[in-house]
Amino acid sequence: MNKQMEQDIASRRTFAIISHPDAGKTTMTEKLLYFGGAIRDAGTVKGKKTGKYATSDWMEIEKQRGISVTSSVLQFDYDGKRVNILDTPGHEDFSEDTYRTLMAVDAAVMMVDSAKGIEPQTIKLFKVCRMRGIPIFTFINKMDRQGKEPLELMEELEEVLGIQSYAMNWPIGMGKEFMGIYDRYNHRIEQARVEGEEKFLKLDEEGQLANPHPMMETSYYKQAVEDALLLEEAGNEFDTDRIARGELTPVFFGSALTNFGVQTFLETFLKFAPSPQPRLTANEQYVDPMNEEFSGFIFKIQANMNPAHRDRIAFVRIVSGAFERGMTVNIPRISKTVKLSQTTQFLADDRETVNDAVAGDIIGLYDTGNYQIGDTVVGGKSSYQFESLPQFNPELFVRVTAKNVMKSKHFHKGILQLVQEGAIQFYKTLHTEEVILGAVGQLQFEVFEHRMKNEYNVEVSMEHIGSKVARWIENEADVKESMTGPRSMLVKDRFDNLVFLFENDFAMRWFSDKFPDIRLYSLL
Ligand code: G4P
């Protein structure tokens, strides 16, 4: 591999921002793009408003969100690094895609609302990152508002998420009294609400302001210095290896909306976020990003919701080498070679086609039905496959039928294809073989319904059977149908594995007490 390409690969930083809705992900993304020069004014990424969208609004949502949905990957250059931010939709469009996207990043930024602390969606997304052992950087947002005490937030990280933390900086006051941050890492104070040279104030050896300043008289300053001392003595040590393994999260305080602390965050983050990482194959060999041969895997397929154009885009995370337009790749799952001529890269500016995508980058392949989620694409004659993407525990279930029984053939074909594509999970009841669909987010059902109608010409009825706790069984042979009751249901998944659907955690525990020999397990 030539030097230039090695440098290009080493310059990539590919990450996702994870958060509970409203913590400020969109605002943060906007500010990052602004620093990256990808947008002229912070404020042009259309924010996602909360509220329920009807499926018919889908196209409209796409249009409105512009950057954040159609361009599921935002790319910009900063400080000699090429930054790829992968969008992980939150809100009501939370789905398995969101989880799978986390399979394609090398790091995650976790946004936390300082007033709300760790919220449910954050916990779910965090777990997926944790499982992958990727570094997680925490940004505690909205310091311009009154929130929880910083020490309380740090404790929450450790207690709720079980991750140790290192405060890179510490707020000086908050809300109306927010004066800035005591920057432990850069050994300075960054003042809020001032510009120019005054913005950064030097600290001396003792960690006090080096030069006299009115701030020194405030209780907020004194508290921050005291807290910083306490953190020095009793807090975790800064340890880059532990950060890299995802065992220690560096914590930054700031305010995305007022653009406070964002640039400092970005610069420090880019210093410690990893360059593209090797990836394991199904045969447990690592493929190094610097391998000459192009390889990648598909982590997301987005169907064009426009019925007039049924094209789909398969998103590929490049694992090694470089992409060249017109190159031929192998899809080992189906032993098929395809020429990659129609591709697109998701740049924040208007460049449309890919010209310099290397390991770490994401490209979109126009798909005419060749690809499935989890597929490996590899250049040359190689035919290895990357380890398969995990399956995620569904939490929502519907029973689904075709409104018109005459359409049964189309109905089954549609379901088969959408399930294969990874849009939705499939289950069936034991004898009656009723179709039950599982999802991690409601949006998956809406997309399913819409696509069945538009692509397969089948109108479906969906009856919610509520949220359930799904558990697979290690010792299937010991399971008897008589073990089910009003609060549990036994179904098969698409690989014919038995699955218990419990009404809730309580019903599951009750079952386990009653049948202690049945060993249940959960997917991710
Ligand atoms: P999300 O993508 O994580 O869902 O969050 P988003 O950025 O859309 O932010 C949610 C709300 O929080 C927005 O207000 C946004 O302006 C606000 N916000 C984000 N960062 C900060 C911050 O640092 N400080 C304060 N005070 N607010 C912040 P909204 O009223 O819901 O929307 P909008 O009308 O302002 O767009």
Image (cartoon, rainbow, N blue to C red):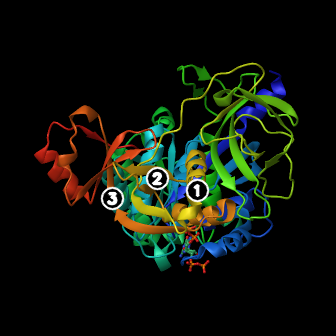
Q: Secondary structure at mark 1?
A: loop
Determine whether 130 is above or below 71 in the image: above
Image region (quadrant) for ligand 1: bottom right
Local packing at callout 2 (Cα closer than 10 Å; few below 14, some 14-19, many 20+) is: many
Q: Which mark is residue 468?
A: 3
Q: Do labels 1 and 2 touch, CB within 8 Å?
A: yes
Q: Quadrant of the C terminus?
A: top left
User: Which of the two labelled residues, at mark 2 and mark 3, occupies the earlier sequence position?
Assistant: 2
Q: Secondary structure at mark 3?
A: loop
Determine whether 217 is above or below 512 in the image: below
Q: Which mark is residue 88?
A: 1
Q: Which mark is residue 125?
A: 2
Q: Nearer the viewer, residue 304 or 123?
A: 304
Q: Is mark 1 within 8 Å of ligand 1?
A: no
Q: Measured from the top left, where is residue 173 in percent x and y? A: 45, 70
User: Which of the two labelled residues, at mark 1 and mark 2, occupies the earlier sequence position?
Assistant: 1
Mark 1 vs mark 3, CA separation in Å: 24 Å
Q: Nearer the viewer, residue 324 or 30?
A: 324
Mark 2 vs mark 3, CA separation in Å: 19 Å
Residue depth check, mark 1 versus mark 3: number of the one nearer the observer: 3
Picture mark count: 3
Q: Nearer the viewer, residue 96 or 307?
A: 307
* Residue at point 37%, 58% (across, down): 226
Q: Nearer the viewer, residue 178 or 13?
A: 13
Q: Amino acid at mark 3?
A: Lys
Q: Measured from the top left, where is residue 147 in percent x and y? A: 41, 72
Q: Is mark 3 within 8 Å of ligand 1?
A: no
Determine whether 355 is above or below 427 in the image: above
Q: Which image quadrant is residue 358 in?
A: top right
Q: Measured from the top left, where is residue 392 in percent x and y? A: 45, 47
Q: Measured from the top left, where is residue 66 in percent x and y? A: 74, 67
